[in-house]
Image (cartoon, rainbow, N blue to C red):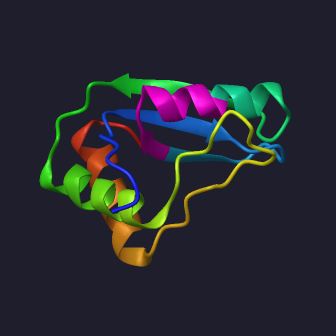
Amino acid sequence: MKNHETLDLIQEITRNDGTTYMELGNMLMNGRAELAAERGFIKQVRILQLNIPHSVHVAAYQQYINENFEIPTEAMDHWEEWTKTPEMQTEVDTVLKENHIG
């Protein structure tokens, strides 16, 4: 595993073109997204829900993220949107429904 991040919040990220997407994250990733917004890589980020329950769907997506992506450092020079397989998009959609978001 590349990372050992625990995903425990839902955030809405607004791309520079004005479109949005929902992402599971944590306070570290939210801070990196805030930094990305300050640097103009994304338009904004906002937390929609904190302390989401750690369901099997969150666990599956968390494992996928930890195995496939690196948490950006403060030296980042772009925003990397985490690409999702169709299966992982289904997991995220299920987490959003479980938390009454979407």
For image coordinates 37% across by 26% down, the residue present is 49
Does residue 80 appear left or right of residue 63 in this picture? right
For image coordinates 26% across by 36% down, the residue present is 99
Q: Where is residue 17 in the image (x, y as percent from the top left)?
A: 83, 48
Residue 31: quadrant of the picture: top right
Query: Which residue range is magenta in the image?
Result: 23-33
Q: Where is residue 37 in the image (x, y as percent from the top left)?
A: 75, 30
Q: In which quarter of the image is the N terminus?
A: bottom left
Magenta segment's dominant SS is helix
Q: Is residue 37 magenta?
A: no
Q: Does the magenta stretch include residue 32?
A: yes
Q: Where is residue 43 in the image (x, y as percent from the top left)?
A: 78, 34
Does residue 31 appear left or right of residue 62 in this picture? right
On screen, 4 above or below 43? below
On screen, 47 above or below 23? above
For image coordinates 31% across by 53% down, the residue present is 62
Does residue 50 appear left or right of residue 76 in this picture? left
Q: What is the total number of numbered labels drawn onto the structure image?
A: 0
- 17 and 37: which is toward the camera: 37
User: Looking at this rendering, what residue extends furthest in the bottom direction?
Assistant: 86
Q: Position of residue 20 (x, y in %)?
A: 65, 45
Residue 75: quadrant of the picture: top right
For image coordinates 63% across by 39% down, the residue present is 73
Q: Quadrant of the C terminus?
A: top left
